[in-house]
Image (cartoon, grey):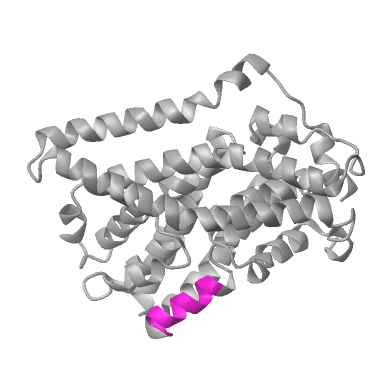
């Protein structure tokens, strides 16, 4: 496993010209999506566009405000890991076998009470510390579900009815370890990171500089990396919620198969924090199948539009495509099993 821990040293920055243009790509893509949705809104029936624009702005701001405290907490935890925890302190108690390390990291969220927004900067800290890409992805996928606040709120909303809580926890753990295993087979995991983040992983003297100054500098660096993506993701979430007709999703809620697809689409659209998404899902429990509720609770914290924008600060687009494919297929299977069993 020593080679695994040295992975960040082997990361190389390639094609610097592309790296300088990369930050504009999410903004261009987000703008294109919003423009397309506005065109759809203009030609579709419903409230006037100014009314929907105002509603979209309100929703975007609410998503941003809801996410911001957890992002800041995640950045602070990331700084603790990178600057204040002595070298080897975490790695010392980690198992040596790769599958066991990923298993432990997938349960690390039990001790980190932040939602998916805060887990991204924390995961960036793990990568900078020397954890491998597959190990970090395992933590990143599991932590938004397997953390104490999510467990408590899901139990408060559903109790043990229809196996929603158990299916969510076991499903999140299984999906995270599946993704970690799949990406552990990649011949060059370092190539999965963006060039900008790979440059940030270049080795430096860990003892250089005062810890307070290093913490402040790292805080600024992380916020500059994450905040633009959070704003873009929040804007997309607000635009999609008001411009895509939700009635079309609700009309198919009683169908065992289509209800899962509808709730997966809704989960990616609404971008609700995983700490409170159970109460939102509870409002659909009377009309949608239990399996579709589980699929919603699995997909939302992992690959909603806000989370994908945050992940793009660290991982290449092809990684995001792979994550979406694995998460969606897994959620469909798990949701289908729940519908058959319950």
Which is nearer the eye, 16 or 77?
77
The image shows residue 104 at horizontal and vertical percentages of 73, 66
The image shows residue 120 at horizontal and vertical percentages of 60, 50
| Relative side of 39 to 177, left or right | left
Q: Does the segment drawn in magenta span residue 34?
A: no
Give the magenta part as a residue range.
149-159
| Relative side of 249 to 192, left or right | left
The image shows residue 153 at horizontal and vertical percentages of 46, 76
Q: Residue at x 73, y 45 (%)?
A: 216
Q: Residue at x 29, y 42 (%)?
A: 239
For this orientation, the residue located farthest to the bottom is 160
Look at the image and tell me whether residue 172 can be seen. Answer: yes
The image shows residue 83 at horizontal and vertical percentages of 81, 50
Q: Which corner quadrant of the image does residue 3 belong to?
A: top right
For this orientation, the residue located farthest to the top is 17
- Main secondary structure found in the magenta portion: helix
| Relative side of 309 to 20, left or right | left
Q: Residue at x 28, y 71 (%)?
A: 289
| Relative side of 146 to 163, left or right | right
Quarter of the rendering occupied by the C terminus: bottom left
Look at the image and tell me whether residue 130 can be seen. Answer: no
Which is nearer the eye, 272 or 142?
272
Which is nearer the eye, 205 or 305?
205
In the depicted structure, whether residue 326 falls above or below residue 169: above
In the depicted structure, whether residue 92 falls above or below residue 163: above
Q: Does the segment drawn in magenta span residue 154?
A: yes
In the depicted structure, whether residue 176 falls above or below residue 254: above
Q: Which corner quadrant of the image does residue 144 belong to?
A: bottom right
Q: Residue at x 47, y 63 (%)?
A: 274
């Amino acid at each position: 496993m020593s080679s695994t821990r040295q992975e960040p040293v082997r990361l190389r920055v390639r094609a610097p010209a592309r790296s300088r243009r990369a930050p504009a790509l999410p903004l261009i893509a987000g703008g294109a999506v919003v423009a397309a949705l506005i065109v759809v809104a203009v030609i579709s029936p419903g409230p006037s566009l100014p009314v929907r624009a105002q509603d979209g702005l309100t929703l975007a701001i609410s998503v941003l405000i809801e996410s911001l405290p957890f992002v800041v907490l995640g950045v602070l935890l990331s700084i603790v890991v990178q600057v204040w925890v002595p070298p080897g302190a975490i790695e010392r108690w980690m198992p040596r076998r790769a599958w066991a390390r990923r298993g432990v990291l997938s349960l690390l969220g039990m001790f980190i009470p932040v939602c998916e927004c805060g887990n991204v900067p924390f995961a960036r800290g793990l990568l900078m510390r020397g954890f491998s890409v597959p190990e970090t992805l395992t933590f990143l996928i599991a932590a938004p579900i397997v953390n104490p606040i999510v467990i408590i709120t899901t139990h408060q909303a559903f109790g043990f009815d229809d196996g929603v809580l158990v299916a969510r926890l076991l499903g999140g753990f299984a999906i995270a370890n599946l993704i970690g295993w799949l990406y552990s087979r990649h011949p060059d995991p370092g190539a999965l990171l963006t060039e900008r983040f790979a440059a940030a992983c270049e080795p430096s003297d860990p003892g250089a500089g005062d810890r307070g100054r290093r913490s402040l500098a790292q805080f600024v660096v992380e916020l500059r990396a994450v905040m633009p993506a959070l704003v873009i993701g929040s804007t997309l979430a607000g635009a999609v919620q008001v411009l895509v007709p939700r009635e079309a999703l609700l009309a198919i809620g009683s169908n065992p198969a289509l209800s899962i697809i509808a709730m997966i689409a809704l989960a990616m659209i609404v971008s609700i924090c995983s700490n409170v998404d159970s109460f939102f899902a509870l409002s659909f429990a009377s009309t949608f199948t239990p399996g579709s509720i589980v699929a919603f609770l699995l997909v939302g914290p992992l690959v909603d539009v806000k989370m994908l924008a945050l992940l793009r600060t660290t991982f290449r687009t092809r990684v995001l495509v792979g994550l979406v494919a694995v998460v969606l297929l897994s959620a469909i299977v798990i949701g289908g099993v729940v519908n058959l069993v319950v």
